[in-house]
Amino acid sequence: NAGVTQTPKFQVLKTGQSMTLQCAQDMNHNSMYWYRQDPGMGLRLIYYSASEGTTDKGEVPNGYNVSRLNKREFSLRLESAAPSQTSVYFCASSGPGNSYGYTFGSGTRLTVV
Amino acid sequence: RKEVEQDPGPFNVPEGATVAFNCTYSNSASQSFFWYRQDCRKEPKLLMSVYSSGNEDGRFTAQLNRASQYISLLIRDSKLSDSATYLCVVNMAGSARQLTFGSGTQLTVLP
């Protein structure tokens, strides 16, 4: 049981380049989330999808777009990367009721130079 | 004021010690509470949910005080493997299952 799978694990971009972070879950969860984690800032919500076909902004959505491709997959796109987007990105999913919190992917370490 | 506040530490304790972490949250209508553990350069993993009556899982005890908007985690008989960052996590009222994370408390258990 893979849980939540994120790709790539590492990426270096030049300022202005674009890329898509991929996330897939095999737990039949309805809700999926993208967070970024910066030193001293904790995890901050970028976007979330409460169910297939819906997406909503979180705390720090600027500079990002998302697509909930189907129930399993939720991608995060950086259209024009900036050094301020250097961070660790985590995808997570949760099931009905959220009684058990979130399951996280292993993260993508992104550096924008 | 941060929505979820934790003492960042670091806490350095000897093996076998008892250590307690505290957390406060700003929204009195918050509904669900958790402690997560995050190892260095890894993803956060659910350690335990926190219930109003308090709950225990082996060496770990979690307490919730809704009146004071305060959550605690107690670790007894610390092991080297307990070294990690502990995240206090709250489901804010009306946030559609979105979780708000504290910045974490770093624990190092020393031999």
Image (cartoon, grey):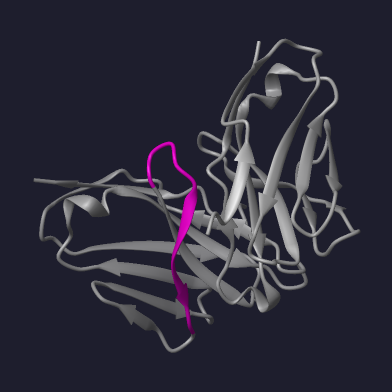
The image quarter containing residue A26 is: bottom right
Q: Position of residue B73 (x, y in %)?
A: 35, 68
Residue drawn at x 23%, y 52% is B81
Q: Position of residue A110 (x, y in %)?
A: 62, 25
Camera sees residue B29: no
Q: Nearer the viewer, residue A10 or A83?
A: A10
The verdict on residue B33 being magenta is no
Question: Is residue B9 left or right of A38 when viewed as pictured?
Answer: left
Residue drawn at x 57%, y 59% is A103
The image quarter containing residue A67 is: top right
Q: Position of residue B97 (x, y in %)?
A: 71, 68
Question: Is residue A33 left or right of B55 when viewed as pictured?
Answer: right
Camera sees residue B108: yes
Q: Nearer the viewer, residue B7 or B101?
A: B101
Q: Position of residue A56 (x, y in %)?
A: 86, 54
Name the outermost residue toward the bottom: B53
The verdict on residue B48 being magenta is yes
Q: Which residues are magenta?
A: B39-51
The image quarter containing residue A79 is: top right
Question: Is residue A101 left or right of A17 when viewed as pictured?
Answer: left
Q: Nearer the viewer, residue A102 or B3?
A: A102
Question: Is residue A59 left or right of B31 when viewed as pictured?
Answer: right
Name the outermost residue toward the right: A53
Q: Quadrant of the C terminus of chain B?
A: top left
